[in-house]
Amino acid sequence: EASRKYNIDLVESFMIGDHPSDIYCAENAGATGIYLFTGHGLKHLHEFKQKPICQPDILAAAKYIINYKLKEKNE
């Protein structure tokens, strides 16, 4: 609903979280999930069938997104 209301392109979006349900939510919406090791992260990492994109903390996740977008822009 929010994607329609605010014209958000979910395919170009990222969702960052420390629980598997955060990553599954991103995938179900068509976005890219980034799993953090902070908070519940390390505790639930074993629950994934396929390892998601992982980062140690929110700052590293932000840097990952910036680098990903810069690389995508230069291709």
Image: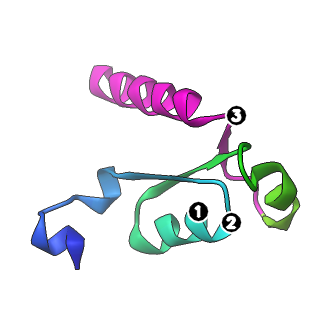
**Residue at screen point 78% across, 64% down:** 48
- The image shows residue 75, relative to residue 39, as above or below, that is above
The residue positioned 71% from the left and 43% from the top of the image is: 38
Magenta span: chief secondary structure: helix
- Closest to the observer: 38 or 7? 38
| Displayed quadrant of residue 65 | top left
The amino acid type of the residue labelled 1 equals Ile
Residue type (three-letter) at the residue carrying disc 3: Pro
State the CA–CA distance, disc 1 to disc 2.
5 Å
Secondary structure of the residue carrying tag 3 is loop
Q: Amino acid at mark 2?
A: Pro
Residue linked to disc 2: 20
The residue indicated by pointer 3 is 56
The figure's colour scheme reads rainbow
Q: Which residue is mark 1?
A: 23
Q: Residue at x 67, y 52 (%)?
A: 52
Q: Is residue 61 magenta?
A: yes
Query: Which x, y percent locates residue 45?
Result: 81, 56
